[in-house]
Amino acid sequence: MTRPDLRGMRIAVTGASGFCGGAVTRAAADAGATVICLGRRPGPVGEHRYWDATSTTPDLTDTDLVVHLAAAVGDPPPGRAAERAFRSVNVDGTARLLDSLGDRPLVWVSSASVYRRPGSAPIREDHPLGGRTAYGRTKAEGERLAGTVGAVILRPRAVYGRDDPHLLPRLRRAVRGGRVLLPGPDVPLSLTAVENLADACLAARDWPPGPYNIADATPYPRDEIVATACGHPVQHVPIPPVRALALASGLIARLTLRERLLSGYALEQLTTPFTLDITRALSQGWTPHRSFHDTARALGWR
């Protein structure tokens, strides 16, 4: 696709060393922008300015736009320690960013994890919030802070692409004996190509403030996507024993302080239809040009 001409703009990207932040950084540089990477580690291109979201305010000197992707992510066992750790970045880090923002426009990248339980209909931006994990809850609270300064808030779901460190590795853990074991029947799911998210981050600087769902053009059948990404056929297993496994995994994680192999939340995400209505973003002229099948071909998945 043709990206906007950003020559002459100085764009600050937080979390630029991460999967999504790196994609936004490269897309901004390709569009001609001067990129300032804010975080503990440098981004793939551009100037690096050190920022620890848990303790300091960022240096936004001589920047025209801020795209905030720095976040604590994951699905840790419940408890006060996890809540504090996620809050220190997703809420307190947002507050520190706003302290330095001034009158600069802000694109704040959130997540569809802020929504309460999905239903059969596509979720719109006015769906009730109330994330069910430390990640979802603290992202929702960070959103509220960002909203006080008129930020554009983007809510992608299950971002995937080259060098994805989260979604694909988790799916591949379910491969057993040449098959992918998935609980329950096939369901439709929205996913977001990292390229589509990057394009939205750059386009959103001109959008009215508020939340926007960001996902690929159409939802996908769960089984087809997982089979393609993992390179193995899907075999359905009953949900009740998997739910028992998730419960046991949670108890073990509490005792060992390690991330759960499977959580009740992850089980819900795999077995419940979860689709996003992206009409609001489309009405701003954004189009999701990348699909899962494009990525599969580019990466040689079968």
Image (cartoon, rainbow, N blue to C red):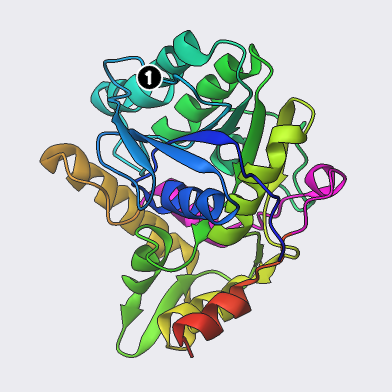
Quadrant housing residue 40: top left
Q: Secondary structure at mark 1?
A: loop
90 part of magenta stretch: no
Q: Residue furthest right?
A: 283
- What residue is shown at x 26% (from left), y 51% (from top)? 248
- x 49%, y 91%: residue: 302
Q: What residue sits 64% from the left and 28% below the top?
A: 129
At label 1, which amino acid type do we have? Asp
Crowding at label 1, few (<14), some or many (≥20) Cα neighbours within 10 Å? Answer: some
Direction left: furthest residue: 256
Which residue is identified by label 1?
59
Magenta segment: 263-287
Is 84 situated left or right of 92 in this image?
A: left
76 relative to 190 in the view: left or right: left
Report x, y in % for residue 203.
70, 44
**Taking the image as drawn, is residue 105 in sight?**
yes
Nearer-the-camera pick, 282 or 170:
282
Residue nearest the viewer, comparing 262 with 237 = 262
